[in-house]
Structure formats: C-alpha cells, structure tokens
Image (cartoon, rainbow, N blue to C red):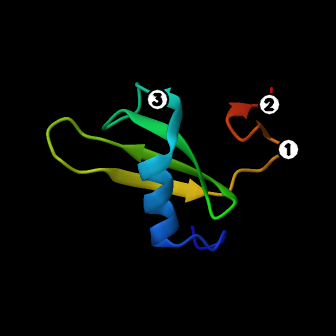
Amino acid sequence: MLDDRLTVDEIFEAIDNGEIIEQYTGDKPFPSCLLYGRVNNRHIHVVCALPEHAEILIIITTYIPDPDKWINFKIRRK
C-alpha cells in the first residue's frame, strides 16, 4: 500500500465498487479473496478475508497489479 502510494480512501472505494476475481477458500485462518477495483484511473488489487463469526473485513494486502502478470488486471497470465 505504501510502496504504491495508495490511500485508505482509494482502498475503501476499490472494496466498495470492486469485484472478486479470485477466491482462496482454503486459506487459514479464514477464506480470503482477491478483489479488483479501479479508482482514480488506477487499477487496484485487495486481498481480504471476511470471517463468518464477526462483522469485520480483514485487509491482508493491497497493491497496484503488474500489467505484465495480468490480462486486463483481472486474469493471471500463465
């Protein structure tokens, strides 16, 4: 987040308006997912978890995706 100079407001907007592009159901201690959002003409990825037993969202990491590793920032290049 800091390396990519993402603001908290940008992260929240990406979460609010983004879409889940990958799900990691086997992650521990909670299943997590990768969200894609576009904010202020920037592509943002947010990895987060939503525990079933609590009304919280855990943000694990967030970053600007490398275009060489993603197709349209939503599909991993193989």
Q: Secondary structure at mark 2?
A: loop
Residue at x 52% of width, y 50% of height? 46
Q: Could you tell me the amino acid type at mark 2?
A: Arg
Residue for badge 3: 24
Q: Which of the labelled discs sits on residue 77, or is there none?
A: 2
Q: Are marks 1 and 3 in contact (CB under 8 Å)?
A: no
Residue 41 placement, left or right of 31: right
Check the image and report above or below for 22 versus 11. above
30, 5: nearer the viewer:
5
Q: Earlier in the sequence, mark 1 or mark 2?
A: 1
Q: Kindly indicate the quadrant of the structure image that contains residue 3.
A: bottom right
Residue at the image position 69 percent from the left and 60 percent from the top: 41
Q: Position of residue 23 (x, y in %)?
A: 48, 28
Q: Quickly name the residue at label 1.
A: 68
**Along the line of sight, the residue nearer the viewer: 12 or 66:** 12
Tag 1–tag 2 contact (CB < 8 Å): yes
Which residue type does callout 3 highlight? Tyr
Pointer 1 local density, CA inside 10 Å: few below 14, some 14–19, many at least 20: few
